Image (cartoon, rainbow, N blue to C red):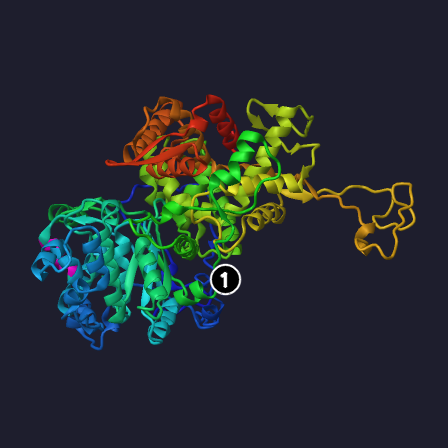
Amino acid sequence: MVQEKNDGINKDMVLPPMQQNRPALSWGSKIKKKVRTVPPCLGKFRPTVGQCCHQCTPDSLSKKLGQNSSLGFHNLLSVNETHTRYRGWLVRRVCCVLFVSGCKVYTSPVSNRLERVCQSNRVKETLTAEHKAPEGADSQGQSSLLSPFFPLINTCISPGVLRFMGWLMLKVFPSVFDRVQVNLNHLSALQRASQEGSPLVYVHVRQSIMDCALIPLVLFCRNLRVPYTVCPLQINSCFLRSILQKVGVVPLPSSVLTEQEAETDGLYSSVRTSLVRELLHEGQALSVGVSAESGQGGQWLACIRQLIKEGSVPDVSLVPVGISYDCLPKTTVQVGLSSVLQWLWALLWRRPGGSVRIHFGQPFSLKEMCESGRCTVDEWLPLQDLLLPVILNNRTNIMFGRRRMSWLLPSEHKGPAHPERDLSIAIILHLIFSTTSCMAVMSTSLVSSLLLYRHREGVSLSLLCRDVAWLTEELLFRNKDVGFGGSLVEVVHYSLSLLSPHIIIAAVPSRTDPFIVPRPSLAATLHLTVQAQIVTHTFVLEAVGACAVSAMLCEVAHSGVSSRVRSSGVDGEEVKGDMEFDVALCQSELTERALQLCHLLPPGFMPPCQSSQSFALDAVDSLVHCGILIMEEIPRDVPVCDFWKKEGALAWTTTDDPYHSDSDCEEQDLRSYKISQPSRCPEMLFFLCSMLAGHLRALCWTTTGLDYLQTPLPEAEFVAQVHAYLCDTAKKKRQNYESCSEEAAHTAVRTLIDLGVLSEERQEGGVFLGISPLFQLSENRQKLQRFISQYLYN
């Protein structure tokens, strides 16, 4: 364990020295804040991350993570002789081999697992129900049908192969990452949880194939049980597949090409559920990745939930794992031996791609979450019920509820009952949000968000350093961990070095302060957008409130209400000075706009246990806390409570009036807000609005692009054509490239399906998408586009 310094900053948290092969930057300017450091914590205390939900799992919450103990971060790639029992010159050269050989490996018996899975009632019933095997068929006929799944069932953990792969990763990863930082305090909580008896299930949000390698490596190096890892990729090489299956990797069956194709196979689902049952009975741990975009991977969690409901498994402990990258590694859809060898060869000529920070959340009981009744889905409603009356009929009294995201768990031929399926979806949403909350904000994410949302036209180095220090403090105040620390100039220099392929750094001889501009290209903008997503998650409350304020201000501007502009007036589209609007924003209307907007958010942004109305109220309150809004003070000639005079007349009530209350003397005036006038308030408001602009603009462009699509189309082809249209639109405008990613296209199509704009038709070739009759009218599509575009700040 690395000891802490007196200032509470670990040695592992200091940024690595700048490497010579990185692009040279001009740092000749004398920055006034050069001496200032960027703290990774508030004082000597780090933000408390990874705690389980206080509402759904209060019993698990009582088991503390151990925040009172001394915190420390360990660089997993820093292996030296102190990690072994030996010392000496020779030990320093073979310390990695000695360290790996000394790590504990838990055995994985697979003696009769294949027989138990094949003879399970669930698999037999599926074979009979789908007429793949007649009743009373011999075992040889059933074995031929189940033969594609034999390698999955026989997946095991071989101690020798696991140690070799651990040594190989410890040797290869230093060429991929500068460091892999792990919170040791969280690992001590995992050790206590593993001793309680319930198997551990690690859940992470899919970002890269590296996720599947980092989690087992961390647990192996810390003498914890290595989990069976669900790999969503198709592995073409038989040799590579056999090696990975001996370290607990569960790949897709060789008979399918994609995970979506595998999940639609009823026999695969039965084999998967039976396999999970046997693994949990053996006491094995599992590692599952869930896609927040499509919900893929959630079927594994649903089958665990089903096993607990049936009583086949007593309980499991879910562990959210937050993995943060300085630079997200690229992921290929299919893995082959040649592609792996090419990747290893390329590592010899490349520089490390930044650091990784891993946080393991607090384990919590899945049985407690499901059976306590605290995780409810009673207020879930289809999105079209929540928003269509507002969009098409301008109805003011909107329905309260949460958006049902049934697509997070694709339905099977014989899926669970509707309430149980909704509960499984609620668990998936809960884990996506918990995992995202565990993730630390890396320095590249912070700089990317500033360049994208605050300084799109460019920024000087000194101003960027000032904003980095400001935004770091804002993140820490919001209880968000950061994965960096050290000198302010070192943090900015390190981030710009990693982001150098996606930015332009201009060093003019006449000025000593370099100027940084994000590259106006599709690839550069998409890279910065992916890096900045975690900052958007942190400020989502303020972003929703800011977009609601922007929508109301646009309505005021279109209605012709006058406003005053102080200072230097307006020059073109740039407002110089502070704007003072002579309008009051009604709290109820502002909350209503925020409520409508929160229904359009992708999964993982809203807390799963908070009502939408409460989230909207918090969004408005957050703008008051950060100084954008101030409470409107209405001057009164008379006191609010005046029993003798109320608007010039006496108001008498009888004492036996059942509706009489002492509060009747209060005037039921609704609260109202005004835009505050600090010099940075408009800039902060636009900064927050820009965080959600990419998602909202993709929705608007997709709605417009429906006129150019020949529907109905297969779902995959429909999403591909929408993605192509978004890219073409952004290229024509030469801006807003963040709205044309594949994730943005997929999320926009899914939102339009939930809104009822697109209809799903199941045919022999799969699911086909077409425009619903209601939105074949251009008038209704224009209403939808106006509704979404009101939240867009231009």
In this figure, which residue is indicated by the disc labeled 1?
374
Residue 310 visible from this viewpoint: yes
Q: Which of the 4 image quadrants contains residue 274?
A: bottom left
Please report the bounds of the magenta region as a residue range: 239-245
Secondary structure that dominates the magenta span: helix
| Location of residue 737 in the rendering, given as x and y in whole percent from the top left corner | 38, 32
| Location of residue 37 in the rendering, given as x and y in whole percent from the top left corner | 47, 54
Residue occupying the point 46% across, 48% down: 605
Q: Quadrant of the N terminus?
A: bottom left
Q: Determine crowd level at label 1: few under 14, some 14-19, many 20+ residues with C-alpha closer than 10 A.
A: some
Q: Is residue 778 magenta?
A: no
| Location of residue 725 in the rendering, given as x and y in whole percent from the top left corner | 34, 27
Disc 1 element = loop
Q: Which of the 4 image quadrants contains residue 506?
A: top left
Residue 678 visible from this viewpoint: no
Q: Nearer the viewer, residue 53 or 305?
A: 305
**Does 537 appear above or below 271?**
above
The kind of residue on which mark 1 rests is Arg
